[in-house]
Image (tube, rainbow, N blue to C red):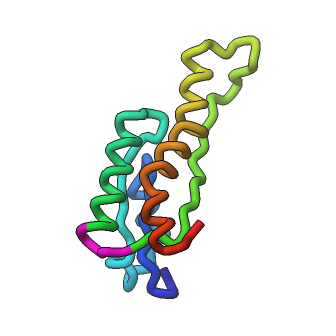
């Protein structure tokens, strides 16, 4: 943001993300509230990103960072149900796949990575 980059931030907690934006750079940040473990929400967020890049800023995407992460404290493999496993996979792997799938055309347009 300090270099006048436009940054798209996706998080369950948008209020926490707002704390990371300098007051004079609020227009450079686009915040999307989403639970990336929920695939319907993840796909909706992907559509919001592509709409923003296409309609609002007519821009490519130069860099994408996927830093989603969460756990269920105390959950060990012997107590992990298939539902717990799928939640982890959706959050950590499937959300990355979907974000990459929908954002790749914008990365290619800008030759980003």
Foreground pick, 1 / 42? 42
Q: Is residue 22 above or below residue 12?
A: below
Q: Which residues are magenta?
A: 55-59
Q: Is residue 22 above or below residue 50?
A: below
- Count the labels in the image: 0
Quarter the C terminus occupies: bottom right
Q: Give the quarter of the image for residue 75.
A: top right
| Residue 104 location (% of width, % of height) | 48, 58
Q: Specify whether 49 is left or right of 70.
A: left
| Residue 26 location (% of width, % of height) | 35, 77
Foreground pick, 93 / 105? 105
Q: Is residue 69 above or below residue 28?
A: above
In percent of the image, x 36 and y 34: which residue is there? 40
In percent of the image, x 70 and y 24: which residue is there? 74
Q: Specify whether 92 is left or right of 105.
A: right
In percent of the image, x 48 and y 35: which residue is there? 37
Which secondary structure class fits the magenta region best?
loop
Q: Residue furthest left?
A: 55
Q: Is residue 27 above or below residue 19?
A: below
Q: Specify whether 50 is left or right of 11.
A: left
Q: Give the quarter of the image for residue 69.
A: top right
């Amino acid at each position: 943001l300090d270099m006048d980059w436009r940054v798209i931030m996706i998080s369950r907690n948008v209020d926490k993300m707002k704390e990371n934006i300098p007051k004079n750079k609020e227009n450079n940040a686009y915040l999307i509230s989403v639970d990336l473990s929920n695939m319907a929400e993840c796909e909706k967020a992907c559509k919001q990103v592509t709409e923003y890049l296409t309609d609002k800023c007519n821009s490519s995407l130069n860099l994408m960072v996927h830093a989603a992460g969460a756990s269920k404290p105390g959950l060990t493999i012997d107590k992990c149900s298939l539902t717990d496993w799928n939640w982890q996979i959706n959050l950590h792997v499937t959300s990355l796949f979907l974000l990459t799938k929908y954002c790749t055309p914008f990365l290619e347009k800008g030759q980003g990575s």
